[in-house]
Image: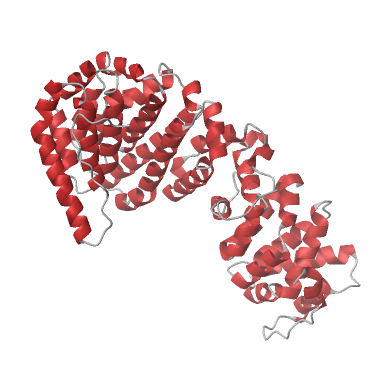
Amino acid sequence: MDIQDLLNESPSKDETTLDSETESRLHRLTADDVDHDQLKDTLEQLAASSRGSEALRHRLASPTNLARLTQIITSESGKPTGSLQPALRCIGNACFEKEDAANTVASLGLDWAVTILHGGDQAIIAITTSVLNNICIQSVEAQKQACKLGLDDDLLYLLTRPDEDDGFASVPLEVVLLIASHRKEVNREGMPSWKAHGTDFTTDVLAWANRTDASLGVENWACMLEITLTYLREPDMQGQVVESKQVDMVWDLLSRNEDLISQQGEAASSGAELDSAEVRRLLKPESMSLTWVLSDLAAHSAFVSNYELENSWLQGVIIDSLRHAPSAVGGATAVMNSHARPNAACQVLGNLLHALPPSSAMPLVQEKALHQPLLAAMASTDDADFLHSATGLLIKLARPSSDICETIASDANLFPALEKLNAHPMQQLKQDALALMRVLGKDSPAVQERLRDIAKDVLVAAAAAQNQEAANGGAPQALTPGSITGVVE
């Protein structure tokens, strides 16, 4: 049903009583013989009164009144006069905690919001964002329609503006996230994308995220991260991040998030009124998501041409993080214990080495002895994600030559690390142990002999785990024991 159909309907009798003056204003709202000044005065009075009157909000939420308000806002949004602001307030108040009203507004269309966000003044835009918040919190259909119209891009663009450049820090984070959460399911073909806001949009989003003040609250921080991640998961955005050499800004978000988890944990253990378990529940998933985004960025085809192995960020941050991996994963408490940074560093460096000639890894073993902290960290943790990522990186480090393999195989922590992989209940880690041993022993009889006994233990454990999985009704993975001299692609 469109706006005109709703306006032509006879208003249904409402049992909610209001004073005669307010009833008269509601009548004037939909009357045909009201001039502009009368309409403006009526809307201002209804907007002011509806803030404190549930009865009036209920009446404004009728389909007929919502259609009239939408009609006024649509006609005023391009060339606003004095009626636009109070009409927005009325529709926002009408949708407050009212799902039916929000769904009705969504069915009437939200194109007016696009017009306002693209050309309204700061005050009107601020009101519009609040109105959208009231509507979208109540209506999934409104969220989807707003997403199809690209309102998430428009709202995020406003958020990224510096304060001195007409920034809109008051844009509710929740409404941006609610709208953006439908990006994958909504068909936006033919609609403007974030690219319409210019080539600097990616830079602006990451700069906004990194200057967000975490002291404003863990929930707000987590919401900001999820908004940013929603965009960073998209291939086009990932390509832009890599091409503009801003992967380090994504790493900075991960580091800040891990620091916040640690700080909140320390505060909780010191007796502050903070629930460290709740902090971890909110922020640990964000760290994991940022880790996999960093992995995707490093696996992007353009990464190798924009980030050489000698890059100062790779050398000074990524590799340095791996050097300190043992102390990072071996924290005294679960709160302080952080695998996210070394895990992400393994992903980034491993994906880069995958795209480079095998010989590129030689200095990382011969000169930097990077295998040593990796193995030491693996020997001191049960974290499955880190064990998997570290093993993958070790396989890349072992590719250059048999001499390199023998250097890695002679490390005192190799056996403890392999035992961690073998003892872990996750079947994949046993496969990882086999893959690492095959690479290390490929061209070295000495390494093959050294690893023979533990290789048998891993094969037995892997077969037992596979049989148990099959007995439990799972679909067992094909296990091909092979030889530790086998080739790992």
Q: How far across and down, in percent of the image, does residue 67 sit?
A: 76, 69
Does residue 66 lie above or below 366 as drawn? below
Residue at x 64% of width, y 68% of height: 103
Q: Position of residue 418 (x, y in %)?
A: 16, 35
Quick one: quadrant of the N terminus? bottom right
Q: What residue is rendered at 68% in x and 74% in y? A: 56
Report whether 133 appears left or right of 281.
Answer: right
Q: How many marks?
A: 0
Tell me: 228 left or right of 274: right
Q: Is residue 369 visible?
A: yes
| Point 77% across, 81% down: residue | 11
In x, y percent, where is residue 212? 50, 39
Q: Is residue 342 left or right of residue 192?
A: left
Q: Please state the horizontal and vertical placement of residue 405, each as a whole percent of the image.
A: 21, 21
Write down the quadrant of residue 185 in the picture: bottom right
- Residue closer to the observer: 262 or 9: 9
- In the image, residue 311 sits, relative to residue 282, either above or below, namely above
Front one among 315 and 447? 447
Does residue 367 appear to the left or right of 255 in the view shown? left
- Comparing 125 with 403, the one in front is 403
